[in-house]
Image (cartoon, rainbow, N blue to C red):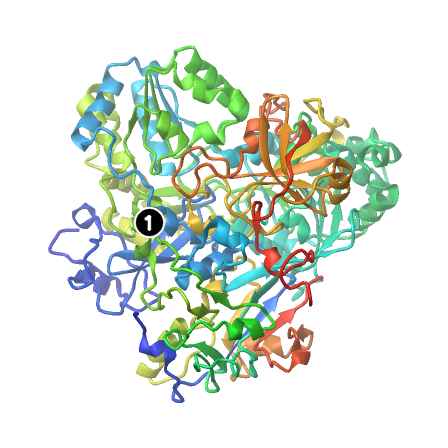
Amino acid sequence: MDMKISEIKMSTEEVGKWGMVIDQDLCTGCQACVAACAMENNLSFVGEEDAGYGRSMHWIRIERFWEGEYPEVKMTPNQPMMCQQCGSAPCEPVCPAFATVHSNAESLNLQVYNRCVGTRYCANNCPYQVRSFNWRDYERPEPLPNQLNPDVTVRRRGVMEKCTFCIQRIHKAQDKAKSEGREVMDGEFTTACAQACPASAITFGRTDQPESLVSHLMHQGHGVKHLEDLGTLPNVTYFKGG
Amino acid sequence: MSEQFSRRDFLKLAGLGAATTAILTGCGPASRYVKREPYQEMPEYNSVGQSTYYATTCRECAAGCGLVVRTYQGRALKTEGNANHPLNLGKTCARGQATLHGLYNPDRVREPSNGDWDAAIQVVADALKNNKPDEIAFLMGMTPDHLFDLVTDMADAAGMNAPVRYGALGLFEARATLSKAAETLFGQAGLPFFDVGGAQVVLSFGANFLETWLSPVSYTRGFTGLREAKTKMRGKLIQFEARMSATGGKADEWVPLRPGTEALVALAIGRLAAEIRGGSMPRAFSSVDPLDVAEKSGVKLEALEHIAEMVAHSTGVLAIPGGAALGQSNGQAVAEAVLALNAFADNLGKPGGVYLSALAPNQSDYSRPASAREMQEFVEKMASGAFKVLFVHGVNPVFELPASLGFKEALGNVGQVISFATFPDETAAEADFVFPDHHGLESWGYQRVATGTALPVLSGAQPVVSPYYNTRATADVLIAAAQLAGGKFADALPYKDEVEFLQAKVSTLMNEADGSFSALDAATFMAYFQQHGGWWKNSDARLAPASSILNSNIDATEAEFAGEGDFFLVPFVSPTLAEAGANKPWLQELPDPTTTVMWNTWIEINPETADVLGLHNDDMVKVSSEAGELEAYVYLYPAIRPDTIAIPFGQGHTAYGRYAENRGANPADLFGVHFNEAGDLAFAGMKVKVEKVREAKSGVGLARLESRMGVYGEALGEEH
């Protein structure tokens, strides 16, 4: 299996802790982020039948719920949901193979595909239900594989996967900054979802830089973190809509 | 640019490094295409691990958003928005992202159907030469504009029929009505531009501007402007529609009016607001009785008054007429009534108001796609045998036109049908020859930005990868065939190839002032044009003439409905698939924003109605109208009127590749032939019957994302 070392190396040299702020008042639910994520991260499509069984491989999904009944019915503000990159992640301690490990340096949850043996304990323990499992080797007929991003491992059957905050982009920016003898600057790069979002509802950046946009937004006061009472310390902050 | 002059040299000259943010240029014909090489033999401009970025234009709809495509060793890996492009400022929609699944689609047409391009060009040349000019017809899609210009030049010179353009999105947006309304309002045809971003209160009459309407990426940016409370108060969106769209889901207030009463509601709000504000009553609102409107529309008088209060007291009120509101028998009146609200709010030509969109740099008159009535005339000509040869490019009329117009049957009376389809669509299946064009990402071209930005923009396209199959640019085929046919055809297209044609067209902009860049010679200008992804002017060119609409009489009538059934039919364009997305597997697997359904067609029914009819989720039902019928699964949708059902458009293909074929149903099969005054189809003016075909079975039904989350307590996750 093709594995990029840079994706799994836990480096203490690279600076930067990463976080995300999502404004649900702006999110239109258009699915541009979902498509962008699929294209960037080599996600498999699973087809109608498996999708019907809940086996689709979305790393990000947009939740909407209904409130009230017709005619006073309301759609709750769209809620993009992806791996919250918890500071204290329930998925991590249950992995017998150390495939779900924590990077304190970058405040990310890593998923080491070639360690994963497919117990699915992590998905079972994730309160956000954001992990997806490769139930099969999903078909990607020629010439579709030409589109695969060479910076991202292609996963196969029996492996768990999830949002990585586009770690390949983080590392690329870090490498570039290092070669130029500086730190990664705010706004120098962003994740695929944030880049595509036509409503600019997603902001990504360094949370260890107090002057970064994401830090400003995080500390505005009206942000919430999902299921915070579980003590997961998520790295994604939501602004509720409406 | 000569062959000795490599891309790398050019890069140095242009002062661009191979940094990740650089956008490379297209070069001259000598080095037209990037070669796709095996990884071990890389082209000289690629160094290991470095990506190459090309600016081009998205062709998934006609909006004309700028893209920057990341390529790596000759393969296109990822599309991103072009951050400098005035229309989309670096953003894309889901369809723009998935355009690569078109490029690398396993079911593309791989070679000309007669096997050989010389023979294909001979066929086209013979078709041009051996028929009288008025027996030759071109039917084209809403993209790309450069090919439309080329065919127009040829048609003008040779006396052929002017090419006709059509697209299903144009039908669902009721563009002819919108243009007619602009003419009524401003005295000039064109596409109105609604400055959502600058407004405070937006009244949207079914405009799905966050989904597929006109220029969704740009309108979504406007929506962000509406919501952001940096320099002003957070703006409000009020949506009037019988079925909650994804746009309606974002509204602060959703008003489920009875279909067909949009004009009445708009006028009643105008009247009530005018009463609150005092002074003389504008004539446009004088004939309407709000109490009567409340009864007819099902919107309570208090609700109308509450909205009128906002309209009367707020600054920055903006009213938008959407496609379904216009695609009714009284569409013209709806458009006038809604635009009159804007005149009342005094927002014409002001920030947060209505403008007439700027024309593109190389455009002298607004031109719109054909209305359904014009398409009917076209089909009648086909059926009468007036056309000996029909060329089809960029559109799939067998799927995109309502079946009741009889396009497929009329094809039988056309002597020869030549399709330039990239994908094996329904129309290509009926054609005598298929001479496939490249995919948009393998193509040269330009697209005029019709609306969505204040600036006049000509968006440029260039190949980002070399053609994958034995396809050929339709422009090149036509140029070669015209030379072969000789005479007027050859005179009309005196170009070596498509690139030379483009250069001739684009370089006319060189002498224009106020451009985004300038250059001293045509080759450099063209190179910059490719590098920047187009050329645009730097100043606002939207028009804002005064209007006297408030002093005109507006017909305060309800729409008429065709058919016998009990239910109003709301057909809407799938926000993720639109008219041509069904063959892209990742678009199929995107959950619909409102229902989260993937890979299929569903019928939205209010849960209470379903209860009365004994229907459950995933039951199969038959919907029949005066024109046709279809079968699809039931989806109990809590945000739709009990007297209304809704069906998305986008699926129901009988061809178009493995991911689209034999999947779902096409609501256009239900459309009868009724037009509004502007000639648009009254597609939202249908009444239909609903019958159960069979009960839901375990393991058969719609694939939805939400069952994963168990919001209805029907599946996983019930416990939390």
The residue drawn where x is 25% and y is 47% is B468
Residue under mark 1: which chain is it in?
A: B
The residue drawn where x is 19% and y is 21% is B486
Task: Name the side, left or right, on which B273 lies relative to B241.
Answer: right
User: Which residue extends farthest left?
Assistant: B4
* Whole-percent x, y for residue B545 in the image: 61, 38
How many marks do you count on the picture?
A: 1
User: Which residue extends farthest bottom?
Assistant: A12
Q: Nearer the viewer, residue B604 or B503?
A: B604
- For disc 1, the neighbor class at 10 Å (few under 14, some 14 to 19, many from 20) is many
The residue drawn where x is 44% and y is 22% is B408
* Whole-percent x, y for residue B480 in the image: 20, 30
* Whole-percent x, y for residue B273 in the image: 82, 43
Q: Nearer the viewer, residue B666 or A92?
A: A92
Q: Nearer the viewer, residue A130 or B72?
A: A130
As drawn, B637 above or below B570: below
In the rendered image, which residue does mark 1 sit on?
A: B104
Question: What is the quadrant of the N terminus of chain A in the image?
Answer: bottom left
Does the image show residue B1?
yes
